[in-house]
Each structure stands twice: as C-alpha cells, then as structure tokens.
Image (cartoon, rainbow, N blue to C red):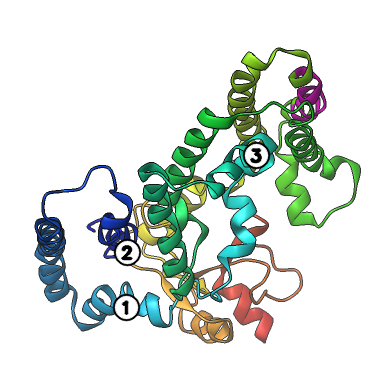
Amino acid sequence: ILAKGPVILVHTLPLALLAPWWAVEHRPRRWVSWYAGMLGAVLMGALIALAWAVPAARAGGEEYSRAIFWGQTAGRVAKSFAHQRPFYWYVPLLPLILFPWLLWPALWRSLRPLAHEPASSAVRLCLAWTVPVFIIFSLISGKQPHYLLPLFPAFGLMSAYALSRSFSFGKYDMVLPGTVILAAGCFLLLHSLFPLKPGLSRLLSGVNPFCSLALIAAGMGLPALYRAIGSRWHAVLVSSSSVIFAVLLHAALTGILANYDMRDFSAYVGRLQHSGIPVAHVGKYHGTFNFLGRLERPLDVVRSEQVASWAAQHPAGRIIADERDPQPGAGAVPEYERPFGLHTLKVWKCSSFTCGRQ
C-alpha cells in the first residue's frame, strides 16, 4: 500500500474472499474468524497508509491532497487521467504477457487435461488468483501491461503443476520458439539491411551485431538439438534456452538502452539552473532530469503555443524540446542535444525563438 496504493487490494482481496472455494483441503475451523482476520488486516494496512497520507496531504496543500486521495485511487478506476484504455485492451496483449510460455506446445498439451477433471485445491488457488484480478483490471479505466505482473507466479505455478503430471514430448515442439528467436535476431539487424525511419535506425544501430547473429544461430539450431537429445533432457534444454535467449536479447539491446541514459543531459540542465538561467520544458514533463541533474527548483512547463511568449519573457532562458515541438527559424543551432529513444532532445536559447519570430 505504501509503494503503490490501494491497488494491491485488487491482487489480494479476491483471493481471500474466494477462500471457501479454493481451500477445499485446508479449511479453517470457522470461516468467520478467517474473514474477521482479513478485515483486520485490511484496516491495519489502511491505518499504516493513512499515517503517511494524512500528514503528507496537510503539508502538500489542497491540490496534492486531491491527487493522492482521489486522483491516484478512485480517479484511475472511473476515468483515469493517464493510461486510459478500453476494457478489452489486455486481451490482445495476452500473447506478449504469456511470452515465452505461449511458444511451447508441450505446456498447452499439459494444461489441457486440467479442464477435463475436477479442479484440485492448487488449481483453484491459481484460478482465484488470476481470473477475478484480470477481469477487475480490465474494468478499471487506467491500464498498463505491468499491472498484471503479480499474476505471473500463479500461471507459472499452474504450468509447473500441469507439466509434472502429464508432460509429453513432441519432436517439433521447439520449432515455434526457434522461429521467434530467429525472427528476433533478424529484426535487430534490420537497420543494416533496409532503410528505416531515422529514429528507429539510430536506435537499432546500437544493437550488438554478434548477439543478433547468436540469436539467429540459436533459433536455427534449437529445434534440431531438441529432436537429437533424449527426452529426459528436454526440460533442461527448454529452461536453459529461455535463460540464454533473455541474456542474449539483453546484451543485444544494451546499445539501445544507452539511448535512454539521461545522466549527461540532466547534468547539463542542472548546470543551467544552478547558474540562475530559467529553463522551460515543452509539453508534459515527468521529472526526467530532477534527480540526475540535482535540480533544486521545478522546471517551467509550457505548451507548444506558449513557447514564443515564454521566450520573450525570459530572453536569457533555455527551452527543452524535441523535433515534434515548435522549432526555431532556419539556421538556428541547438545549444545542446542528445538522442532519447526515437527522438532527440534539444536545448535552445530563447533568442533562437524570438529571432525566428521576428
């Protein structure tokens, strides 16, 4: 609750409320005591949160109070101020959420018998852990893929349970995983084979080509190796190939991640502010430079249509923008720039905008 707010109750309350359905083998003596304990735990957690939230709201003022008591809780449920998505938004993401398990046919063959036999307490526990929570998050207005991360252990436990009971070997089970690994390696080499958009080409140019080639080789060799080794080694190969794929992919993407390193840019913004130079950020600002740049004051946040007027009011100031935002007149050169993802962040002198307007 202290880290993320009451949303943790979405992950815990349905499971606790459905205990009479899934705890078929380990029932408490009295369900009244179970629910009383659950209510006491919720109230205790609420008191811990309120011990922080009430003093914070009093110190932060009316706007901050409204944000932490309404905007970050009920506001996200009914009509989210951020990440507002339709109710079915999680469904198309399920293949990505279930990656890489989705790619292994042996797992789905093992799960199939569970649908044709009475559910054990273990299976019911995992279903009560995942299905109600998935439905509730689908109904909540604000959605992000990582909101479902706490459901992964339940699916992992149920998968392990199914595999331990009815694992069956298929000689072509690794064709689909191998194809995906091969496709990932080929995609990371696209920039060297085909012309792409400048931002995407620059992003992919940071990929380590040796890791991309290793992914291609692994994708081609994995199905053949799976067929060649004995069945007792299949679980070892599958688990180790998942780890190797993750390590190779991470190594290949290290260059891409460097595009999101804002330490030098933030330090530059910090030096501007510490020198007494006013700095504005065009568009929504997420505090990107505050910590890394050791900023002591908030940046001014301006909309695109306000850039010229802000520059006129602060002739010695600087404006942070990227290529999607208003640009100065022809011939103007940014004082500082750095790639950030698919875009490039630039620091402009206000005189560049005022001269361009004239």
> CA separation, marks 2 and 3?
34 Å
Amino acid residing under circle 2 = Val
- Report the residue marked by disc 1: 74
> CA separation, marks 2 and 1?
10 Å
Residue 206's place in the image compared with 266, above or below, is above
Image quadrant where one finds the C terminus? bottom right
Q: Position of residue 181 (x, y in %)?
A: 74, 35
Between tags 1 and 3, which lies in front? Answer: 3
Residue stretch in magenta: 215-225
Q: Nearer the viewer, residue 267 or 89?
A: 89
Residue 7's place in the image compared with 188, above or below, is below
The tag earlier along the polypeptide, 1 or 3, is: 1
Q: Residues within 10 Å of mark 1 (few under 14, many from 20)?
A: some
Residue situated furthest right in the rendering: 194
- Asked if residue 221 lies in the magenta stretch, the reply is yes
Amino acid residing under circle 1 = Ala
The tag earlier along the polypeptide, 2 or 3, is: 2
Q: Position of residue 237 (x, y in %)?
A: 64, 20
The tag earlier along the polypeptide, 2 or 1, is: 2
**Point 66% across, 28% down: residue:** 168
- Report the residue marked by disc 3: 109
Q: Residues within 10 Å of mark 3 (few under 14, many from 20)?
A: some
- Asked if residue 17 lies in the magenta stretch, the reply is no
